[in-house]
Image (cartoon, helix red, strand yellow):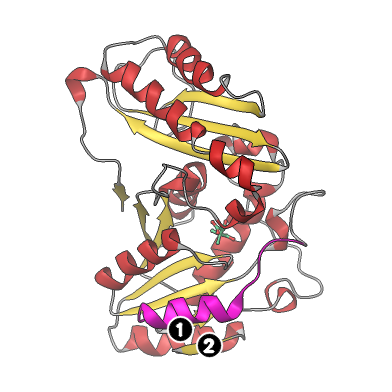
Amino acid sequence: MKIIRRPEAMVAWSETLRREGVTIGFVPTMGALHEGHRSLIRAGRLRSDALVVSVFVNPTQFGPGEDLARYPRMPDRDHALCRTEGVDVCFEPTVDAMYPKGYQTVVTVSKIAQRWEGERRPHHFQGVATVVTKLFGIVQPHLAMFGQKDYQQAMLVRRLVQDLNLGVKIAVCPTVREPDGLAMSSRNIYLSEEERTIAPLLYKSLKAGGEAIRKGVIEAAAVQNTMAAVLKQEPRFTIEYLAVCDPLTLEPLAQVTSKAILLGAVRLGSVRLIDNLIVSPPRKRCGKEAMEIG
Ligand code: PAF
């Protein structure tokens, strides 16, 4: 596996392969790779001839007071996982290489970035959209893999690719969970032992909402109450939002009459947890949680 640090070297590698007709798959990450990333890498590996993983803790997507300084960084472990999974290139640029002196261009996706995570983390999605656009420009992938865990991010990237004609196919892969249901995340290491035992309640609350919809509950407010009731069993949770939304626009629904996404965000001590679940009402089952968007 090659480790490339300079954007110009990455561009040169990709241009050569593209000229040879090789399809390039791409998994953008911030490192601290876990089983969720492994599943994205495996999915990318299956669908492309050459696979690039980027490891870049992108400062512009962290707000003031967020965890940029303490975000886990474990390059040796990340390289070992990438090697085991047959990754061709690990692209690890420095902050200065990505945002050189004089840098002044940002990418803003409007509507889809405003609610939910966007409301709680005001500059987050501008940072994500900017770095993803830059990474796509440098890596020049045919296909990029994103996890359903960060559902709003995946939908925002899909919008960005369509709006800016970036020509990258976006695959959204199912969330990988711990045996007790907790969605895998690099930030789970911040949970204390005690917090870790109650953290799966977020997914349980989403499943309770999903179950209500499958049993025929139509009113979104009733579904939200069902989800909230599960979380209220544990006073250490602070609910940030529990939402029933259109799966493509992420606009809130008043009633669930077709496929919907349940979104949840909570605080548990100093840790923020987010998760989601795609559900269909009784007569319009879709059966699959994964979506592929081209
Ligand atoms: O999901 C992430 O790890 C990051 O937001 C991404 C897409 C790598 C951009 O920094």
Along the line of sight, which residue is nearer the eye, 39 or 201?
Answer: 201
- Disc 1 to disc 2, how far (Cα)? 6 Å
**Left or right: 273 in relation to 213:** right
Residue underneath mark 1: 89
Q: Which image quadrant is residue 52 in?
A: bottom left
**Left or right: 167 in relation to 193:** left
Q: Position of residue 255 (x, y in %)?
A: 38, 12
Please give the name of the residue rendered at 30% of the width and 41% of the height, measured from the top-left corner.
289
For the residue marked with disc 2, what is the amino acid?
A: Ile
Residue underneath mark 2: 3
In this picture, which residue range is highlighted in magenta?
Answer: 70-86
Q: Position of residue 250 (x, y in %)?
A: 47, 31
* Ligand 1 quadrant in view: bottom right
The quadrant in which the N terminus is found is: bottom left
Q: How many residues crowd mark 1 within 10 Å: few (<14), some (14–19), many (20+)? A: many
Q: Is residue 28 visible to the viewer in this orientation of the structure?
A: yes
Q: Is residue 39 magenta?
A: no
Q: Which image quadrant is residue 266 in?
A: top right
| In the depicted structure, whether residue 20 falls above or below residue 143 | below
Q: Is residue 81 magenta?
A: yes
What SS does tag 2 mark? strand
Q: Position of residue 210 (x, y in %)?
A: 35, 24
What SS does tag 1 mark? strand
Q: Which image quadrant is residue 206 in?
A: top left
Say whether marks 1 and 2 touch (CB < 8 Å): yes
Q: Is residue 166 visible to the viewer in this orientation of the structure?
A: no
| In the depicted structure, whether residue 217 falls above or below residue 84 | above
Q: Is mark 1 within 8 Å of ligand 1?
A: no
For the residue marked with disc 1, what is the amino acid?
A: Val
